[in-house]
Image (cartoon, helix red, strand yellow):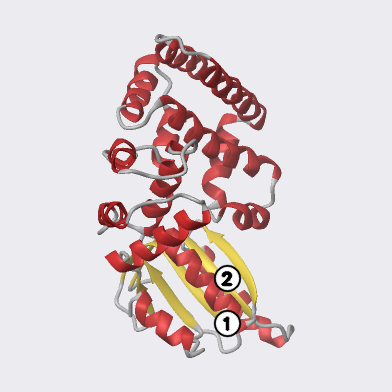
Amino acid sequence: MNQKQLRQKLEKKQLDNLYIFCGDDYFLKEIYVNRIVKISGFEPVKLNIFEIDELEDIRFKILSEGLFDSSQKVYHLKLNFALDKKTILFKPKRHIVIFDPIECKLKNDAAVEFTKPSFDEIKAYLKSKLKRENKAISEKNLDILSGYFVNQTTSMLYNETEKLLLYTIDKNSIDLDDIHACLAHKTVFDFKMLQKLFEEKTQKGISDLIDAVLSTLSLPVFIYMLSKEVIKIYAACVCSEKCFEKLFGRFYFRYAGLAKDIGCKKVGVLLKKLYETDKLIKSSSNEYLSSYIKAMFVVWMQNEL
């Protein structure tokens, strides 16, 4: 079953007690988890499971809950490991369980393959999004923009659209030059790059990573995107897991791990540095500003983190 078939079932309010969400499109999977919760009316429970051994305890808890608790729940189990034929799955009678592994290595009738959106779906999303943001775009340019996202995940569609909106923040319309300038290269800055940035300890290593990012992003956009990720790390310091995932829709344990490695106090200092850097970029026209900021940032990352 793919997400279109799942959507058709949900439109008819046909619910199952077991789902296995396959694919790396976390944004799309989150949408369907919320749809299942809304249609069922059950209480949502999201659990991050790091080791396969933890599944046995979770299985016992979910299957025995009906003996003591009359409420019904949708359990969204985010697995930090692959799901294969050796994994013991379970299907409760009262609750709904959604397995959401990092990789599916099994065939099962409960599996839902999340495929990439079609051209028409992409175009409809962009048209609606740009209208809400009061951005005018011609039909021809909308087709060109939509074509850029064919065979890409909805996560990429969402992130790159946000980048385009930031790039045209001082304009009321999006033209072809904006599309080419902003989306000519795929953004290489993601969570894995963030991890590498904080794990790298040598000045050359940090410098090379930043150069790789700046080859596809302008400095203001890089600072903006880095700040968004650092805010999530800081939030992992002060928020509960449930609060964090409700706010950001991301894996709490990933950012909590970085927060623990870096130290919450240093994350706060980094946020302040990024805020000061953003102000400096917006207030200066010095042609050497980018080189100065990069050098300052590299030295600070090496010495302080």
**In the figure, is residue 98 to the left or right of 81?**
right
Q: Can residue 89 be seen in this view?
A: no
Q: Which residue is disc 1 drawn over? A: 39
Q: What residue type is labelled 1?
A: Ile
Local SS, label 1: helix
**In the figure, is residue 227 to the left or right of 210?**
right
Local SS, label 2: helix
Q: What residue type is labelled 2?
A: Ile
Sequence order check, earlier mark of 2 and 1: 1
Q: Which residue is disc 2 drawn over? A: 58
Residue 286 image point, x, y percent:
45, 9
Is residue 200 placed above or below 22 in the rendered structure?
above
Is residue 67 placed above or below 155 in the rendered structure?
below
Residue 301 image point, x, y percent:
50, 19
Residue 192: mark in rendering: none
**What residue do we see at 61% from left, 29% from top?**
267
Is residue 257 placed above or below 280 in the rendered structure?
below
Q: Quadrant of the C terminus?
A: top right
Residue 91 image point, x, y percent:
50, 84
The number of numbered discs placed on residues in the rendered structure image is 2
For marks 2 and 1, give the one nearer the viewer: 1
CB of mark 2 within 8 Å of CB of mark 1? no
Residue 250 image point, x, y percent:
53, 53
Q: Within 10 Å of the Cα at label 2, are there few (<14), some (14-19), or many (20+) other Cα atoms?
A: some
Q: Within 10 Å of the Cα at label 1, are there few (<14), some (14-19), or many (20+) other Cα atoms?
A: some
Q: Can residue 171 be seen in this view?
A: yes
**What residue do we see at 63% from left, 44% from top?**
236
Q: In which quarter of the image is the N terminus?
A: bottom left
**In the figure, is residue 90 to the left or right of 121?**
right
Q: Measure how far apart labels 2 and 1 are at the Cα level.
A: 24 Å
**What residue do we see at 62% from left, 25% from top?**
266
